Image: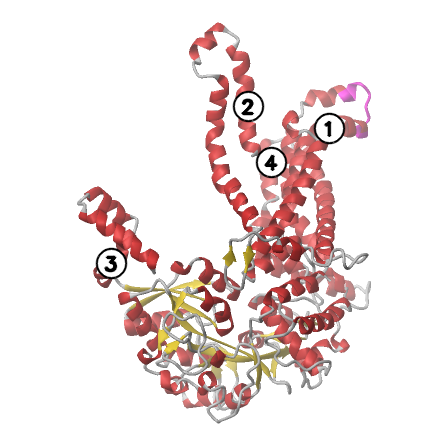
């Protein structure tokens, strides 16, 4: 913010000096693009930093059509998004990131909280985010960085999370899901119902977890708890002893050859599963869909211990102000107005404002994706490709069942530094 | 660095003898050493701005402290002490960093030895058996084929070949040689070494080939005339003269493999530790000072290996 202002001040002064050449130079270098009146004459452009989850081309096209705002995607991995917010806060306008990274981002002061009063649909946002319960009233597990713990700030420029609702919202919720293990039912040939199966010697050399420490350790904790070895007070915020214990269990399994490979990237997880290298692994919903669309049986298996959930939302860079900030609000309001929500729902994610998304979906689509009912017609992906034939039922069933079954959320622990070191030790073991 | 020194080397021999004659002294008013510096200058500036200064920053940052979201510019050895955590307490077991470097060095040695062996013979073939320049060019370009696809695609392509249900395994099972698919073909040290050799043999071929084509053919004829066997010629003439190429190729391969984390990660199923991997994990967790400390350690170890190699062969003298 302050840096941008300084640049503007300088170019204004150089202009006032009447030095035509210098002004030309400044214009050429793009230094005066910060002037509001220059901006308003241009097309409305927002640089959108995020992971690939929400960054559909169709969404950007529709947004341009509806609002005249041109979205420029900057795509990065979850870790790289956070890194970029820390190191180059002026390189983006709108940030799409996960709630768990807020514990790092908010204290850095590099983002601007949005004003809830300016978000038209804010009161219609699902109670999953605001109250920690499903619309049907089921209480959702709150271990880890649950969104409702970090949704509000104490004040406009505060770096502290508020314990009760305020108008300053860290991230306006957009998308979330409940993750679990993916399995190959054709190769396992028996029902799987617990996270503990991941370490079952029956699947020796055929299991996998993801090699992103902050998410991997949550899956590991689900497994440890499922085997009955230990019960955590909060899986998303372990003590050093708990981290040691969790990594010890995982290290023993690794040494015994339980894991075929760890994956880090969406495509890797699809390949491992589709090729039969693994038959049980932690996975993301669209990856399961992708394996299935290749004609290979793959189930996003609901497990009795519950799901590990994640959620993401929008905020803006601290460098955004004036007209640009208004466009950012316009964009966020558009995003929650239904088209994008329906698009995300059709990919197997969940949208933050259910009512508007529902209005943009066919009743049979809504019944399949959200109500857990058998598909009346063939279910198609947003790009028109066939996902499921008529009669299929979504793994895990309805929204109420899946979100109601969430046990914990992706998290950044207080002992994150120690955990990362232990993770490196685990990989080296 | 090599390049700037090369320029110096090439510049001064030409000038120093020249300055001896009166005519040359009249033409060149600038002192020879100044001209040399001038010639080396641009490269030195680039080197300074894009290598030395950033490197100094890395060393400085490695002694800083950090918290979850920022660097704290106060002196702290935490990056280093954390890295060597348990190295004394766990004796005689190796600590994480010890295990990691042992593994990295092992992979590095294997890859180096295999690429040297293959690279040497490919270069030998290109230099001595292929007579036409065009064919030499064409065949060396063939060695670049592994670089035509992106890293990720190349890695994914190994799965249908080496995987549990891949070509090799299903072929072996069908011919009845084995009953169960061989597991260690993929996501093992074997596959890591295979992929690295596949990629980096090229870096051996080029410098060795370059040294070999510069060998005066009459030396080989002389050896033959003096009654040396083919093997004696190889050991006493060709290998000593190809040494600079071998050392340069070795430096390429060793520095790349020491810092690699992508290939080792993907081919090793992310289960094999690598020095570069530790740095990546630290950077991703925003622990920049710890990452910088690991980078300094990696640099020091790589530098140690290379200086040992240049002890064996004085590249500057040989070129």
Question: Front-most of A186 and A8?
Answer: A8
Residue at the image point whose x is 59% and y is 67% from the top = A416
Same-subunit check for callouts 3 and 2: no
Residue A361 position (above or below residue B81): below
Same-subunit check for callouts 4 and 1: yes
Question: How many C-alpha atoms fall within 10 Å of the one at disc 4: few (<14), some, or many (≥20)?
Answer: few
Same-subunit check for callouts 4 and 2: yes
Nearer the observer: mark 4 or 1; the answer is 1
Which stretch is magenta? B223-231
Residue furthest to the front: B74
Residue at the image point whose x is 71% and y is 38% from the top = B121
Report x, y in % for residue B142. 60, 44
Q: Is residue A286 visible?
A: yes
Snapshot quadrant of residue B253: top right
CB within 8 Å, label 3 to label 1: no
Residue B56 position (above or below residue A162): above
Residue at the image point whose x is 64% and y is 48% from the top = B298
- Label 3 and label 2: CA atoms lie apart by 54 Å
Secondary structure at numbered mark 3: loop
Snapshot quadrant of residue B5: top right
Which residue corresponds to mark 3?
A35
Snapshot quadrant of residue A202: bottom right
Which residue corresponds to mark 4?
B135
């Amino acid at each position: 913010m302050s840096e941008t202002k300084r640049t503007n001040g300088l170019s204004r002064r150089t202009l006032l000096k009447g030095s035509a050449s210098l002004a030309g130079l400044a214009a050429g270098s793009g230094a005066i693009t910060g002037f509001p009146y220059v901006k308003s004459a241009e097309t409305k452009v927002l640089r959108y930093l995020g992971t690939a989850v929400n960054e559909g081309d169709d969404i950007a096209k529709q947004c341009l059509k509806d609002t005249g705002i041109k979205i420029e995607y900057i795509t990065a991995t979850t870790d790289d998004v956070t890194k970029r917010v820390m190191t180059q806060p002026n390189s983006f306008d709108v940030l799409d990131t996960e709630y768990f990274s807020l514990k790092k981002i908010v204290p850095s002061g590099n983002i601007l909280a949005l004003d809830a009063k300016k978000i038209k649909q804010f009161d219609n946002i699902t109670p999953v985010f605001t109250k920690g319960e499903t619309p049907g009233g089921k209480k959702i597990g709150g271990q880890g960085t649950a969104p409702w713990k970090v949704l509000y700030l104490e004040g406009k420029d505060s770096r502290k999370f508020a314990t009760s609702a305020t108008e300053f919202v860290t991230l306006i919720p957009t998308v979330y899901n409940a993750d679990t293990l993916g399995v190959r039912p054709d190769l396992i040939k028996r029902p799987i119902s617990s996270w503990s199966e991941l370490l079952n010697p029956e699947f020796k050399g055929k299991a996998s977890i993801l090699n992103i420490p902050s998410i991997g350790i949550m899956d590991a904790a689900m497994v440890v708890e499922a085997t009955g070895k230990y019960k955590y007070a909060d899986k998303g915020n372990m003590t050093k002893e708990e981290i040691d214990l969790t990594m010890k269990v995982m290290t023993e399994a690794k040494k015994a050859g339980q894991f075929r490979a760890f994956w880090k990237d969406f495509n890797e997880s699809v390949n491992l599963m589709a090729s039969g290298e693994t038959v049980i692994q932690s996975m993301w919903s669209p990856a399961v869909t992708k394996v299935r669309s290749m004609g290979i049986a793959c189930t996003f298996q609901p497990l009795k211990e519950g799901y590990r959930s994640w959620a993401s939302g929008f905020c803006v860079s601290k460098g955004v102000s004036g007209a640009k900030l208004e466009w950012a609000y316009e964009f966020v309001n558009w995003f929650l107005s239904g088209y994008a929500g329906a698009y995300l729902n059709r990919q197997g994610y969940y949208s933050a404002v259910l009512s508007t998304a529902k209005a943009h979906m066919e009743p049979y689509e809504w019944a399949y994706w959200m109500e857990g009912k058998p598909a009346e017609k063939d279910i198609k992906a947003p790009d028109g490709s066939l996902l499921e034939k008529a009669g299929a039922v979504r793994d895990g069933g309805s929204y109420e069942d899946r979100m109601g079954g969430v046990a914990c959320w992706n998290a950044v622990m207080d002992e994150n530094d120690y955990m990362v070191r232990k993770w490196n030790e685990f990989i080296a073991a | 660095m090599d390049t700037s020194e090369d320029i110096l080397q090439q510049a001064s021999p030409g000038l120093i003898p020249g300055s001896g004659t009166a005519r040359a002294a009249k033409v060149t008013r600038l002192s020879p050493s100044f001209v040399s510096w001038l010639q080396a200058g641009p490269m030195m500036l680039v080197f300074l701005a894009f290598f030395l200064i950033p490197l100094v920053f890395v060393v400085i940052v490695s002694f800083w402290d950090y918290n979850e979201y920022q660097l704290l510019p106060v002196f702290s050895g935490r990056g280093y002490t954390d890295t060597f955590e348990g190295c004394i307490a766990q004796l005689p077991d190796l600590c994480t960093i010890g295990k990691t470097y042992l593994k990295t060095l092992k992979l590095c040695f294997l890859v180096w030895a295999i690429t040297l062996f293959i690279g040497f013979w490919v270069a030998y073939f290109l230099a001595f058996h292929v007579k036409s320049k065009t064919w030499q060019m064409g065949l060396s370009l063939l060695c670049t084929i592994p670089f035509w696809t992106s890293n990720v695609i190349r890695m994914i392509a190994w799965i249908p070949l080496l995987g549990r249900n891949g070509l090799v395994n299903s072929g072996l099972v069908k011919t009845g040689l084995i009953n169960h698919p061989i597991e260690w073909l993929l996501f093992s040290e074997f596959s890591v070494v295979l992929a690295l050799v596949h990629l980096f043999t090229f870096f051996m071929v080029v410098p060795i080939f370059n040294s070999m084509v510069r060998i005066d053919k009459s030396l080989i004829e002389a050896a033959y005339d003096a009654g040396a066997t083919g093997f004696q010629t190889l050991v006493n003439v060709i290998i000593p003269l190809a040494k600079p190429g071998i050392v340069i190729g070795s430096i390429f391969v060793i520095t790349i493999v020491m810092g690699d984390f992508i290939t080792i990660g993907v081919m090793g199923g992310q289960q094999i530790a690598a020095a570069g991997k530790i740095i990546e994990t630290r950077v991703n967790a925003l622990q920049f000072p710890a990452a910088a400390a690991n980078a300094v350690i990696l640099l020091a170890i790589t530098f140690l290996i290379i200086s040992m190699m240049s002890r064996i062969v004085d590249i500057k003298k040989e070129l």
